[in-house]
Image (cartoon, rainbow, N blue to C red):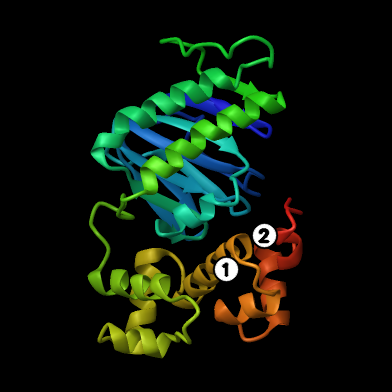
Amino acid sequence: MSVCGSAAWARATTSHPHPNHNRSVPQGPPPWLFTWTTDGRGLLRQGTAQAWARPGELVVLAPGVPHHYTVAPGASRWGFWWTHCQALPGWAQWLGRCAVGDGVYAVGAPDDTHARIEAAFHRLLADSRWTGSGAPPAAVPGEAPVAVAYGSAARELALCALEEVVLLATAGAHRAPPGPDARDGRVRRAGELITADPGAPHTVDSLAARVALSPSRFAHLFTRETGVPPMRALREARLRHAVRLLESTDLTVERVAAASGFPSPFHFNRVFRERYGVPPGAYRSGERP
């Protein structure tokens, strides 16, 4: 493992029921949790959302929501890499298309990226031990499973390796289904409509009409399949869109709010601060928790 920022990265293999990985964190950890499954199957829950972790899938839990993870029911073991660290700002954009709900992201990486992702985790584990003098240590088979990156240079190298993992897993990847079966096509279509144009004046009624469902049936089905109500999913998509605009344009905060579908700059400032810990202007200036 290794821990970044106080970054921690770890390789963990467990058999059911292993108490260290069947656990809940009532307040949610300050850093993000990244898991990459190598064999077996796991189950991660956060808030009202859940994701099944299979070999070749990256499952990420954002901070601040109580979470629980364990070997999946019916599986004898779950082999996986995991790391706690502070996510870099750009990662939210790459992970956004893989959102399951309540800060859970799940994505199946393309098969031809698996070997490189595995190598990046091994390098991440080795780099997190670097003292800052001489060359970073080479990754060694059978290396100790846990390392903490205390030095700033070690943290930056470890984050570079994890960024490679996130890019490889999300670029051209498919969204991992939230359970043993794929998500209802109507819910998937509604999610695509939200992602394609989060600033549009979507409502439960308008989205339901686009997928030929009654508003009540649509809201129930969407919440059951994704773990969050459609309007909360829309708010998260709008916030992710706002972050992209803040990071890549010089639009004023007021124009970012309007382009992202928020009814007023005041409302935008309030929900943005609740989600990211700082107001939009401070986020753009780099003042992030």
Residue 40 can be seen, yes or no: no
Residue at horizontal 51%, vertical 73%?
232
Q: Which numbered marker is on residue 239? A: 1
Give the total of numbered labels.
2
Q: Residue, x 27% and y 82% (percent of image)?
A: 211
Task: Residue 10: give x, y in percent of width and height.
Answer: 51, 26
Q: Residues within 10 Å of mark 2 (few under 14, many from 20)?
A: some
Residue 71 relative to residue 283: left or right: left
Give the amino acid at mark 1. Answer: Leu
Mark 1–mark 2 distance (CA, rounded to whole Å): 9 Å
User: Quick check: marks 1 and 2 in contact, CB under 8 Å?
Assistant: yes
Marked residue nearer the N-terminal end (1 or 2): 1
Residue 131 in sight from this viewpoint: yes
Q: Quadrant of residue 224?
A: bottom left
Give the structural element (helix, strand or loop) at label 2. Answer: helix
Q: Mark 1 packing: few (<14 Cα in 10 Å), some, or many (20+)?
A: many
Residue kind at label 2, given as amino acid type: Tyr
Residue 221 higher or lower than 43, as above or below: below
Q: Give coordinates of residue 216: x percent, y percent.
A: 37, 86
Asked which quadrant contains residue 197, the reply is bottom left
Residue beneath the point at 46% across and 83% down: 200
Based on the displayed image, in which of its 4 quarters is residue 256 positioned?
A: bottom right
Pick the front one: 106 or 174: 174
Kindly give the residue lying farthest to the front in the view shown: 250
Q: Is residue 253 above or below residue 68?
A: below
Q: Where is residue 105? Give x, y as percent.
A: 44, 52
Q: Which mark is residue 276?
A: 2
Question: Residue 148, which numbered label?
Answer: none
Measuring 48% from the left and 87% from the top, which residue is drawn there?
A: 201
Q: Secondary structure at mark 1?
A: helix
